[in-house]
Amino acid sequence: MITVMGATGHTGRKVTEILLHAGERVRALGRSEARLAELERAGAEVLAGDALDAAYLTRAFRGADAVFTLLPPDLQAADYRAAQDRVSTAITTAIRDSGVRWVVVLSSLGAELADGTGPIVTLHDYEQRLKQLENVNVLVLRPGYFFENFEESLDLIRQHGINANAVDADVTMPMIATRDIANVAAAALRTRDWQGIVVRELLGQRDLTFAEVTRILGTRLGKPDLPYVRMTYEDLTATLVQTGLSADVAHTYAQLLRALNEGLVKSLDGRTAANTTPTRFEEFAEELAEEFARA
């Protein structure tokens, strides 16, 4: 049995589907029974609950050979770091009390830093808690910027004819498809072939800039002249609050973008064959174009 947190999200769903396809028994966790229903029909055991509830997580982890964990975001939190700290405390408590021996953790590049990286600091805090566990083998996956973040660009392109963010157009960074993260995570959950705490970076197929992403996306959407607009941090924060994020979450996200611009969120290992993954942004852009056409 393998337990998967966040099984209705981008990465967790893909991990669950890969494991089910491989014939593994999977216990899929999420907040919503309705959203878990599709995975139950696909053969997963499902268990809905709140990731803040250590007792729920302990039940979900108990009896599992391995567990995939992540910190589900609370986009309305008045204090994002404090809210995520409560979640990571509940998860580490459940790992300890359930007796599970192998844990795969979704973290991020930049998680070695204790401050200055916006939401990534909560993953730093989580990693520090995991280091205090005894007799648990932990694989920490630190991927780059998700391709899926650009799904949010589609409405902006449709309504205003631009792609925009507060990242400088020509800042280069590793970007990755969540399917590639899921493939690595699922393989590790099945093989359980590491000991102690291991950190593995995942850097995607190549480094990209927001300008290059916009050019590729514009070409796929039939908008080859699609411009990229560099927003101010203040304008971005105000826009995020207007879309429903709390003021603290919006400010925290702006901190992340500043950290990207300043080169704080980066690979420590450098690109290698082992941390390079196959999916090109051009492939993902085709999927975004199909989604754009359907709307």
Image: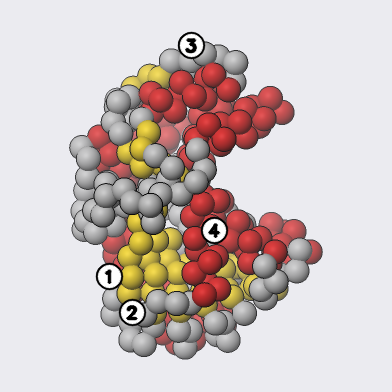
Q: Which of marks 3 and 1 is in front?
A: 3
Q: Name the residue under label 2.
A: 196
Q: Where is residue 128 in the image (x, y as percent from the top left)?
A: 27, 70
Secondary structure of the residue carrying tag 3 is: loop
Q: Which residue is pictured at 53% across the width and 66% down the height? A: 187
Residue 22 appears in which quarter of the rendering? Answer: bottom right
Pick the front one: 7 or 51: 7
Q: Which of marks 4 and 2 is nearer the N terminus?
A: 4
Q: Name the residue under label 4.
A: 183
Q: Which amino acid does label 1 sit on?
A: Gln
Q: Name the residue under label 3.
A: 225
Number of other residues with Cα within 10 Å of mark 1, as a class: few under 14, some 14 to 19, many 20 or more:
some
Residue 37 appears in which quarter of the rendering? Answer: bottom right
Total label count?
Answer: 4
Q: Which residue is pictured at 42% across the width and 45% down the height? A: 204
Q: In this view, does 154 lie above or below 2?
A: above
Q: Distance between the residues labelled 4 and 1?
A: 25 Å
Q: Which amino acid does label 4 sit on?
A: Asn
Q: How far apart are marks 4 and 2 (CA)?
A: 21 Å
Residue 232 visible somewhere in the drawing:
yes
Residue contact at pointers 4 and 1, CB within 8 angstroms: no
Pick the front one: 206 or 79: 206
Residue contact at pointers 3 and 4, CB within 8 angstroms: no
Q: Is residue 169 above or below residue 22?
A: above
Q: Which residue is pictured at 38% across the width and 52% down the height? A: 273
Q: Name the residue under label 1.
A: 128
Q: Where is residue 43 in the image (x, y as percent from the top left)?
A: 75, 69
Give the residue furthest to the front: 273
Q: Position of residue 217 (x, y in %)?
A: 52, 25
